Amino acid sequence: MNSSLALYRESPALLTDLYELTMAHGYWKMGMADREAVFCLSFRKAPFEGGYAVACGLAGVIDYICGFAFSADDLAYLASLRGHDNQGLFEGEFINYLRDPRFGCAVDAMPEGTVVFPHEPLLRVTGPLLQCQLLEAVLLNMLNFSTLIATKATRICAAAGGDPVYEFGLRRAQGIDGAVTATRAAYVGGCAATSNALAGKLFGIPVKGTHAHSWVMSFDNELEAFDAYARVMPNNCVFLVDTYNTLEGVKHAVEIGRRLRTRGGKLQGIRLDSGDLAYLSIEARKLLNAAGFADAAIAATNDLDETTIRSLKEQGAAIDIWGVGTRLVTAYDQAALGGVFKLGALREQGNPGAWRHKIKLSEQSGKVSIPGMLQVRRYCVDGQCRADMIFDELTPPSARGTAPRTMDIVDPMDATRRRSIADDMPFETLLVPIFREGRLVYTMPDLPAIRRRAQEQLAAFHPGIKRAVHPHQYPVGLESELFALRQRMILDARSTRQMLGGALPG
């Protein structure tokens, strides 16, 4: 498996919210289970007050769908659930229906490593309404967290300015799955290695690590501890030098480095884990260079993130490797991505060729959904991305007769923000087929290829869009006819509600 689902022996089919199952029961009871629907998964605001996100987590989605089935234990558990009247929550016939889920949906998604923006669909599911509904919670779980961590990693790696960043967050991550998932996503986002040995095994990510303070404290003195480590691990000598006195620790590392050299070994470097990292790294560099260890690396840890790394860089810190843990794997300063999974259209009953667009309203304009079978075109010139257009595949731009010389896109949150795109500008269609009629049709790239895609994608955008603070807003808009349709549906729905005397939907 390519995802953290490899950790679990239990069937993951019940990894869902109860209301997905109660709705599924309702669709089945009302004869709507097989009515064709389309749902899109997107997020409304870029994380970390930034300008973009990096799509991640598709591998887990594929593993989940390929293995989707309710076990006998799952069904027995569902049969045991009771409603407020102490009767079974689900009818026995519905439980039997779930024994053979007959997954038959089409899934389209952005490949992992794709740079994505608010309101764009990361993933789209088309198929029987009941089956689409059962996927909602797990898709959000898998894509929200992985995308959040991959994005955080790109920000940290950008701050490091090309220096290697190692992910060291296992001990502070949110549980086993949180740790393994975060490690994979951090690697996609640009981290060069991890301390997490299980993730290294599962995903082929390089693993790094030497010793902790407890090793030094287990010996009578620091010099003895370093010497012992050099003898038992001569090919892995990076010494943690701040157990007692950092600069004295550097001197001890130098002394053991000289002994290593006489035995044909090499001092790989030192690690700083506390104190004034800028000052200590500069002084440590002087000591190492003066002793003939100019090639020994200085690694730093200690609650680092993109803000701290930028500050240390500005102070001239002599740090070569950045070990980032807690603030990466917990996506420190943003708890969640906030992705949503919304119904965009339903097939007309009794008229299999016709679709009816659906929209969800809100008193908050940012929560109004976008109707349709959504797709994204990314327009690029000379390898640089210029704009993204969200359009409806039920009525795509190319199907509207004579193509105009230009097409207009409209910001879904601000109708005054518009941009014209020449109809002959090259573009890439971002959502690609993953499943067709329940059958996997996509070949998952290996993890290094996904990581490269993220780097190549980021390189294709203007630096202003990637700024950590107050980034430039990349042009993303609804195709003008889709924008007009959405506006009409909003007005029609609100007009109908007001005529019926009801409150506006919340």
Image (cartoon, helix red, strand yellow):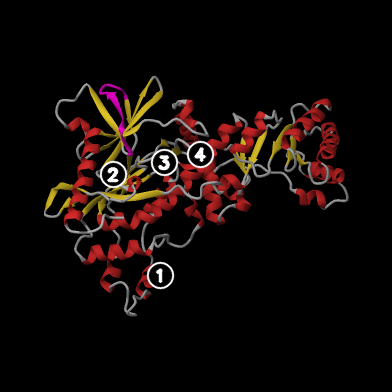
- Residue 418 part of the magenta-drawn span: yes
Residue 492 in percent (x, y) is at 18, 48
What residue does disc 4 label? 188
Residue at image point 52% right, 54% down: 177
Residue at image point 36% right, 63% down: 70
What residue does disc 1 label? 73
Dominant secondary structure of the residues highlighted in magenta in the image: strand
Which one is in front, 232 or 49? 49
Which one is in front, 147 or 331? 331
Which one is in front, 453 or 498? 498
Tell me the crowding category of disc 3: few under 14, some 14 to 19, or many 20 or more residues within 10 angstroms, Cα based: some
Residue 230 in percent (x, y) is at 80, 41
Left/right placement of residue 202 relative to residue 369 reads: right
Left/right placement of residue 199 relative to residue 30 reads: right
Labels 1 and 3: the sequence-earlier one:
1
Camera-nearest label, 4 or 1 = 4
Residue 444: image tag: 3
What residue does disc 2 label? 370
Calculate the distance from the C-alpha at mark 1 to the C-alpha at mark 3. 31 Å
Q: Can you see residue 191?
A: yes
- Residue 439 part of the magenta-drawn span: no
